[in-house]
Image (tube, rainbow, N blue to C red):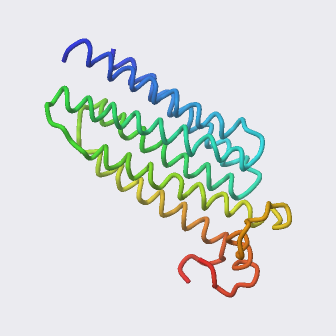
Amino acid sequence: MSQLSEVAISALLVISGLFGLVGSWGLVRLRDTLQRLHAPTKATTLGVGGALLASMLYFALTHGQVSFHELMISVFLFITAPVSANFIAKTHMLHHVQPEELPPTGRATGWAGYEAAGQGEGSGN
Amino acid sequence: MITLALAFATGCFTLGLLLNLYRLVRGPRAADRILALDTMVINVIALIVLYGIWIDSQTFFEVSMLIAMVGFVSTVAYCRFILRGNIIE
């Protein structure tokens, strides 16, 4: 393995470690729950993406076999991170944010989640 | 050099796991705990991938893929349980 590829893999590993640490540190450090939602869903996902990229590069350069498993994992994580963040925000808002505090949506329906959970009618998913 | 960078990244993600554990124990609200668990899953995936590079083996990708799927499903199930009081209606 050449010097250049070694430097590239090491840089990716260090950057991904720093991103992961920043995400977890933000989870501890930020003040509010909705603020805390920002750090792990973005920084940690990027950190894992960097680690997977480093793994892909490492196995491609040392073993000469390019595998797309890592790409699959990172695409999966990049797709699911916003979905789970949205779910966690909805969970928080249902119990700790009143509907009156929210800005108007500007359309006929209100903010999702409130009326369905309040009535238990099962109209909204 | 890769060994050193690998040790650094492993240390970072392990420290992150400990910070998540702090938020999981301390977290004043349920959303904080769900978020901490979700982040722990992501950090564990990173640790598994780094371990795969460490022992020079490609057998861990399926494991991390499975853990990613289970982590996502469990996060959604936990949130849904709190949102609706039921997971499958």
Q: Residue at x 65, y 76 (%)?
A: B84
Horizontal and vertical percent for residue A52? 35, 37
Q: Residue at x 40, y 54 (%)?
A: B67
**Camera-side residue: A111 or B13?**
A111
In the rendered image, the quadrant that contains the C terminus of chain A is: bottom right
**Which residue of the protein is positioned furthest toward the right in this rendering?**
A100
**Which residue of the protein is positioned furthest toward the left in this rendering?**
A64
**Which residue of the protein is positioned furthest toward the front in this rendering?**
A106
**Which residue of the protein is positioned furthest toward the bottom in this rendering?**
A121
In the rendered image, the quadrant that contains the N terminus of chain A is: top left
Q: Tell me if A44 is positioned left or right of B65 in this view.
A: right
- Is the residue A24 above or below the residue B41 in the image? above
Q: Total label count?
A: 0
Q: Tell me if A55 is positioned left or right of A20 in this view.
A: left
Q: Residue at x 61, y 65 (%)?
A: B79
**Camera-side residue: B59 or A80?**
A80
- Is the residue B52 above or below the residue A13 in the image? below
Horizontal and vertical percent for residue B53? 30, 32
Horizontal and vertical percent for residue A33? 73, 49
Q: Residue at x 66, y 40 (%)?
A: A27
**Camera-side residue: A49 or B45?**
A49
Determine the image quadrant of residue B3.
Answer: top left
Determine the image quadrant of residue A49.
Answer: top left
Horizontal and vertical percent for residue A111? 71, 69
